[in-house]
Amino acid sequence: MAKVMIVDDDRDFMDSICRVLKHKGHNTTALYDTEGVIERLEREPHDVLVLDVMFPEDAAAGFHLAQDIRKHSDLTRLPILILSAINTKFPMGFGPDDIDETWMPVQDFLEKPIDFDVLTAKVQKLAANSS
């Protein structure tokens, strides 16, 4: 059972993700904006971070948060899964090939709308690899 933090501003979508992951036996923490995420992760370690990219205050807030997380020595190994609809709003074709240790320092990328079975499999794989 993994402890999964999900950061996404879409409350309905977040509720769905939490239900699915809890049904698979994971503990979830839901946060609706990027403020205070690093401090929370430092206080309460998690096995996986599922992170949206676009937030009302900044269309690239998720990318910025992932970059900031990698600057904290306690969090450099935290697996991050980007979960975003960025290609719907800004059709630039972001995807797993763009994962980069400085610009997009994450382990995986999943585009919305998502297949919950794929999401669950990716979270389980990332959690297993973080142990």
Image: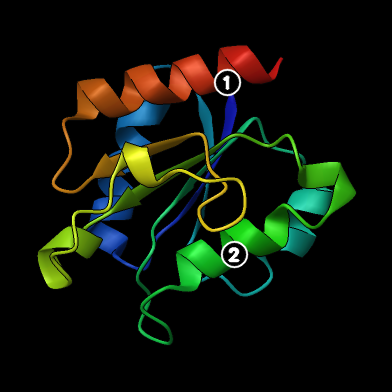
Q: In this view, does 16 lie above or below 121?
A: below
Q: Which amino acid does label 2 sit on?
A: Leu
State which mark lies toward you, 2 or 1: 2
User: Relative to the observer, which residue lies in front, 69 or 99?
Assistant: 99
Q: Which element carries disc 1, helix, strand or loop?
A: helix
State the CA–CA distance, disc 2 to disc 1: 20 Å
Which mark is on residue 127?
1
Q: Name the residue under label 2.
A: 65
Q: Are marks 2 and 1 in contact (CB under 8 Å)?
A: no
Residue at (52, 46) in percent of width and height? 100
Q: What residue type is labelled 1?
A: Ala
Residue at (61, 46) in percent of width and height? 101
Label 2: few (<14), some (14–19) or many (≥20) C-alpha neighbours in 10 Å: some
Residue 1 in picture, x, y percent from top left: 57, 15
Residue at (86, 44) in percent of width and height? 74
- Residue 1 can be seen in this image: no
